[in-house]
Image (cartoon, grey):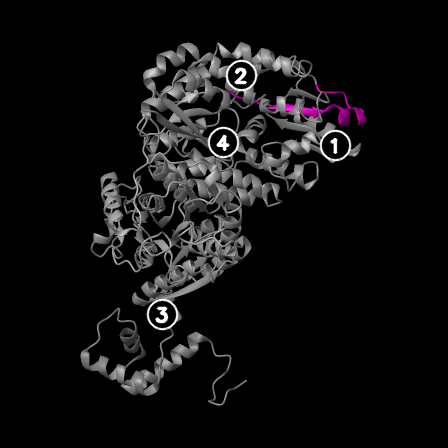
Amino acid sequence: MRSNDGFSSRESPHDREARHTGDVARAAGTSEAVVSYVVNDGPRPVADETRRRVLEAIKTTGYRPNTIAKALASGSSGALGLVVPDISNPFFAALARAIEDEVFASGRVLLVGNSAESGEREARLVSSFIDRQVDGLLYVGVGHHAHVEQALSAGVPVVVLDRYDPTLGVASVVVDNFEGAVIATEHLIDHGYRRIATVAGPSALFTAVERIGGWRKALKSAGLPNGDDLLVQAPFSRAGGYAAGSALFESQIPDAVLVASEQQAIGLLAAAAERGIRVPEDVAMISFDGTDESRFSTPPLTTVTQPFQEIARHAVALARPLDADETRHLTCEVQLVRRRSCGCSYPMNENHQAPTELANTEDAWQSPPKEEPSMNRTVRVAGAVVAAAAMSLTAGCTAGGGSGSSTTGTQTITFVTPHQGVYDDVIKSFETDHPNIKVDLQVIPFTEIAAQTQARLGSKDSSIDLIAVDPPRLPSMVQKGFLVDVSSDAKTMKQDLTAGGVKSVTWNDKQWAYPLWTSDNFLFYNKDLVAAAGITAPGADNANRLTWEQTLDAAKKAQGAGAQYGFAFEQVDAYYALQPVLMSMGAGTGLSGTANLTPAVDTSDWKKFGEWYKNLYANGLSPKGIQSAQMPDLFKSGKVAFYVAGPARITDLQKSALADKWGMAPLPYEDGGKVVTPTDSWAVGVSAYSEHKAAAEEFARYLSLNSDAAVGTSTKFNLPPVNQKAYPKYIHYIDGVAPEQTAQYGSLLTTDSDEHAARRPSSIGYADFETVVNKAFADIRSGGDVGSILGDAQSTLERQLAQYK
């Protein structure tokens, strides 16, 4: 088929380019090669007169070089990709505009994708950008990090924005959310407000965790309340802010609110207006972000404003292959812009801005400053600077006030833990014995404790004094400088605690935390469902331990006799629960080599386990769509025949409708394999950033080394204490809770601990490892290809763990 100009309409871009180049060459009286040298600025020099003729010929022929072909030939597409969760959100729109300006100034173009908070859509966008061979990917994700791995595997540099996840091992640019929240809260305190609430984002997000931490620190330093009754978490949206405001204003209206995003603040203003609550007369408000919307709200919003241009400059600069010693994590400072919503007169020209080292770096966008590759660049405000700046702000405000600091000499220490209700009685006893120390408990969900600890301590959050420590994560926390060395108590620990307990908190021959408990897993079963299926109940001692084959065979029979599910793990997709099965099947821990930094999760034994685990859910024997938090109720409601869980479940079961209708047996093992059981449990560490280290260490020592305290927490949580004097009392207590079911518990626990226990691997890369393998287990449970999933996990771990070698 021919077009009107006589050429084929199916002409390829390459042929079309060659034809146009020939036209220019004939018009200029030179060769096509010379035209190429002029267009591509090389590789050979061209005489000035010849260059002039070629450029004139280009104009007269109307020739436009094929930029795609030119880009591919040079190895660069001249384009960057940007993925944001919601382009309609003014914050992301402003960020995208700043990045586009920066990219355009560099002679390139920006491709923008809106994931609409959808992981599936996000994956398609990233794949599309990779197919278009973008030079780099700028990414504000919704938590589906497999997309980041996909880009990295394709050789595309990735820069994460507005999020920080060290396990990704990629460059990132964030703002100092923690210090921004401190400055904003201090400003509200300087106005004289005392009951200051916060509307935060979802707790799984880095930004939300940091802003909550800064809010708590400022209030705690001023001796003001900062408990969960003043904390409301909601999505970063107007609807989220409206819902949060509705909840917040139902009870006692606070004096002021720190709002984690501008969109939430708009929703909060609407909720206040509906109830006749005036801002700032009845409740003051400061928000984060600082887009143009904050200027035109009613009243205009005081904001912790983010430097969009600076973020864009650093992000675009990092979107390239980086040398090993280049800075990969940049933190930009924020600015407090004061308007009427906080109670300041308006307009205000004086702004409160922390000094920014990066802003003074010449040509930082071209050559980011270098430092040790193992360290993160975090530009912060010194405490003296904050204090001085806060004092200077008072003069410009409509109201003033003192710091609210206590003069009684009582120290309040904050203990961050996932264990609700475990420490209440022990804290009362401790405070009675130590009248000058008060303990403030902050309970964070188990699924979020690791991320929140990382984010808050990574920000040097001094409002945390004590931290719940999961032993295999201890080396990483030590390496990051998060924990205080408590080896001065090593002699007492070795005298009073089990050797295994002391070993769980030891790294490089020093002790970094106080161990509290050890652990084990058991096979719990529903007596009625087992009897209905005509199955002989499992034996309760080590000599009658079932194999996995026997267990699952019995589970299938129970399901056939009416059980909704035959078998379930309580800790779904968790390495802690699945490591014993893996090792009993002949697999290794998944980490080996020097300092346990060599991954091995794609071996034949790991794949064998993967198929076994996948089939549990594919065949409907185990509940596919139910998460760990829902599992206890599923078993207690009589829907599961066999159930793997820890001793913490004993009292809970006996108090439920299943009382006396359950039994417990040893954890099964693989036929022909060795018996393997889990061990170790939580410890408590003193934060290196605590301002009350001595008081914090005194409470930690009390929890671990005082036998009465150890009994108190162990009988609340039902986990065996590592305190040797407390252990017999704990066993006696368990005997009294469920005498029949736990008749063999003490001896079985001892046998498992002495003969079968396998520790999770200690490694400074364990946090990365656990995150990757837990996600792999989740993907396998969802029906993914085992070989591909474990192969991807292996590649990811090889790359991530390399940074620690």
Q: Secondary structure at mark 3?
A: helix
Q: CA distance from mark 1 to mark 2?
A: 30 Å
Q: Residue at x 44, y 26 (%)?
A: 471
Q: Secondary structure at mark 2?
A: helix
- Label 2 or label 4, whichever comes before in sequence order: 4
Q: Which quadrant of the view contains residue 313? A: bottom left
Q: Is residue 675 above or below residue 238?
A: above
Circle 2 packing at 10 Å, graded few (<14), some (14-19), many (20+), is many
Task: Find residue 556 and name its label.
Answer: 1
Residue type at the position of mark 3: Lys
Q: Residue at x 31, y 24 (%)?
A: 409
- Label 4 or label 3, whichever comes before in sequence order: 3
Q: Residue at x 70, y 25 (%)?
A: 525
Q: CA distance from mark 4 to mark 3?
A: 56 Å
Q: Which residue is mark 4?
A: 418
Percent coordinates x, y for residue 154 in the rendering: 44, 54
Circle 1 packing at 10 Å, graded few (<14), some (14-19), many (20+), is some
Task: Find residue 753 and name its label.
Answer: 2
- Label 3 or label 1, whichever comes before in sequence order: 3
Q: What span is in magenta? A: 517-538
In front: label 4 or label 3: 4
Q: CA distance from mark 2 to mark 3?
A: 66 Å
